Each structure stands twice: as structure tokens, then as C-alpha cells.
Image (cartoon, rainbow, N blue to C red):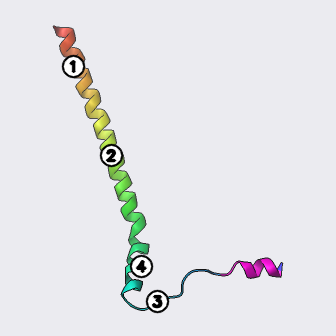
Amino acid sequence: MGQIASYWIDFRPSVVAGPLAAEGAFYKTFTRPVAKCALLAVFVYQLVYFGWTKLETDEIRRERQGE
């Protein structure tokens, strides 16, 4: 069991001082929220596009039936 426990060493990089550390902290903090907002925006866009297309096709069908 000692061998397995020694294998699971924390491989996270040590804290680095300087501008790269601040940049890494920024991306670590904000990557998931930005990705979540971007995916949500794409989903909402697709939902609105589908709704708009559905309304357009219904309108075109009604116009053709009226002729």
C-alpha cells in the first residue's frame, strides 16, 4: 500500500511569482464561467433561430393555403 500512496503525489505546479502567475490565476478563475456563458449564448441563439424558422414556415404555409 505504501507504493500506491507514494504514487499519488500532488503534481500541481508550485506557485510562481510574476506576471505569468497572475495570468494563470485569471484563466483558472474565469475560464469555466466564460465557457458556460458562451455555451448558454449558443444554446439560446439556436433556440431562437429554431423558433423563428418555425414561425416563418408556418406563415409561408398559411400564405400558400390562402392562394
Q: How many residues crowd around disc 2 within 10 Å: few (fewer than 14), some, or many (20 or more)?
A: few
Circles 2 and 1 in contact, beta carbons < 8 Å: no
Circles 4 and 3 in contact, beta carbons < 8 Å: yes
The amino acid at mark 4 is: Gly
Q: How many residues crowd around disc 1 within 10 Å: few (fewer than 14), some, or many (20 or more)?
A: few
> Majority secondary structure of the magenta segment?
helix
Q: CA distance from mark 2 to mark 3?
A: 40 Å
Q: Residue at x 18, y 15 (%)?
A: 63
Q: CA distance from mark 2 to mark 4?
A: 30 Å
Q: Residue most toward the bottom?
A: 17
Residue 20 horizontal side relative to residue 58, left or right: right
The amino acid at mark 1 is: Ile
The residue indicated by pointer 1 is: 60
Q: CA distance from mark 1 to mark 3?
A: 62 Å
Tell which tag, 2 or 3, sits nearer the viewer: 3
Q: Earlier in the sequence, mark 2 or mark 3?
A: 3
Q: Earlier in the sequence, mark 2 or mark 4?
A: 4
Q: Is residue 3 magenta?
A: yes
Tell which tag, 4 or 1, sits nearer the viewer: 4
User: Residue 67 in the image: x percent, y percent?
Assistant: 16, 7
User: Residue 8 in the image: x percent, y percent?
Assistant: 70, 78
The residue indicated by pointer 2 is: 44
Q: CA distance from mark 2 to mark 1?
A: 24 Å
Q: CA distance from mark 4 to mark 3?
A: 10 Å
Q: Residue at x 46, y 89 (%)?
A: 16
Q: For residue 23, what is the image quadrant?
A: bottom left
Residue 18 horizontal side relative to residue 59, left or right: right
Q: Which residues are magenta?
A: 2-9
